[in-house]
Image (tube, coloured by chain):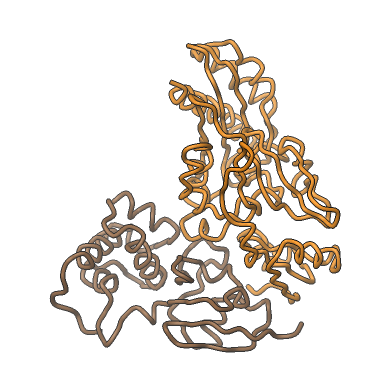
Chain colours: A brown, B orange
Amino acid sequence: MSKKLVSMTINGNKVEEAVEPRTLLIHFLREKLNLTGAHIGCETSHCGACTVDIDGESVKSCTCLAVQCEGADIKTVEGLASGGVLHAVQEGFYKEHGLQCGFCTPGMLMRAYRLLQENPDPTEEEIRVGMSGNLCRCTGYQNIVKAVQYASRKLREPATDTVAA
Amino acid sequence: MIPPSFDYHAPSTVAEAVGLLAQLGDDAKILAGGHSLLPMMKLRFAEPAALIDLNRIDALRGVSEEGGLIRIGAMTTENQLIASDLLKAKVPLLPEAARQIADPQVRNRGTIGGDIAHGDPANDHPAIAMALEATLVLTGPNGERQVPATEFFLGTYFTAMEADEILTAILIQPFAPKTGYAYTKLKRKTGDWATAAAAVVMTMDGERVASVRIGLTNVAPTAMRASDAEQFLVGKSLDAVTLDEVARLVRAVAEPAADLRGDEEYKTAMAGEMTKRALRQAAERCR
């Protein structure tokens, strides 16, 4: 099975690589590009640890082929902070202790990032529904909800103090 | 888990996709949202030599109204069903049901056509399409043909679609005013398949049922209509005695497979209970 040349934009950088059609996006990101932020959890599209942003939508990268992303604009957790400053969702998870072991966190951050663009001021229920494709086995979700609420407030307010990455 | 090797094709038109399918034959599989097929390939339950990816065919996406019917492109995603103002106004059962399918990320990829064409009785759209009396448009080398959803599901993973055909659209009659509807789904957690679920589309004449269609999810080898219960209901008011008899008629036709979601007795009972709840909710919406 011959390799296919694919090109896409990842965190603002143009990437062009030859891949086997069977290469899943998560393996392409982690093994070919060394972007190991997105995690491989369940591999069956349940846990959400591999969530990335593709053309403005949250997608589980374990259930998407790299060849399907030809021409796509992809953002991974590595692309969240900018200029050494944490993104509001990262700051929220840090301030509100939205993680314990941290395995689910990259997927949580990427889903929260997109959720707050789909719905900048979600209710607690909307957060729980919006984050329902991401599993966490440590926190019980309370602080994850608080972290998303923190980020929501921060993103809607004029810029104030920031936390260094 | 990495799928076995395959050749990848991403046509941009339906004609091109049909041509590829004819040329590649049985070794090829159609790739829609991929959230059933790719996991099956990882587990080696499916090992196609080639995938024909429909995701680049823009003509297969979207909801429109044509000739008095709602036409849904087969590659329309669950989240696009949820967001469709046309569906909210004309076939509100679909956006309501789509919210109960999978999770936000999966709904960005999973499509109504893939959900139906897969022929899995655990999928939600087959029973919903049967309750809607939807018409499925199949496109093959000889053009299009239409098959009623009620005649499409022949067995588990076995449908009326020929090997050289692609499901391209779903056609649905818009709801008449005061049509009641509900999709009631029992599931253990977000993203799970139904333990049992019922889709209801109903009209009432005063307190009595004028017409009703009931589709059942995951309680038999295929999605099915609860025809005995439907016939019994016409002309009745939805009192407790009537609903208990409906549940009994549903239980009589349910033949679920036991799994981690429950044994046969429990799933059979839940098929009856989900139907009762869907009927009550649909009746409220008839007013």
Question: Percent position (x, y) of residue B113?
Answer: 65, 51
Tell me the residue at 24%/69% (across/down). Answer: A92
Measuring 62% from the left and 20% from the top, which residue is drawn there?
B248
Whether residue B177 appears in this view of the structure is yes
Q: Could you tell me which quadrant the C terminus of chain A lies in?
A: bottom left
Measured as percent of width and height from the top left, residue A53 is found at 45, 71
Q: Residue furthest left?
A: A160
Q: Farthest front residue?
A: B67
- Quadrant position of residue A145: bottom left
Coordinates of residue B31 in the picture (x, y in percent): 68, 63
Quarter where residue B199 is shown: top right
User: How many dots with numbers?
Assistant: 0
Q: Is residue B266 above or below residue B238?
A: below
Is B261 drawn above or below residue A3 in the view shown?
A: above
Q: Residue at x 35, y 68 (%)?
A: A113
Answer yes or no: is residue B218 visible. no
Which of B190/A56 is in front?
Answer: A56
* Relative to A164, B1 lies left or right: right
Question: In the figure, B177 relative to B29: above or below?
Answer: above
**In-image side of B211 versus A106 (left or right):** right
| Looking at the image, residue A31 lies above or below residue A58 | below
Residue B86's spot in the image, x, y percent?
50, 43
The picture quadrant where one finds residue A100 is: bottom left
Of the 4 image quadrants, the one containing the N terminus of chain A is: bottom right
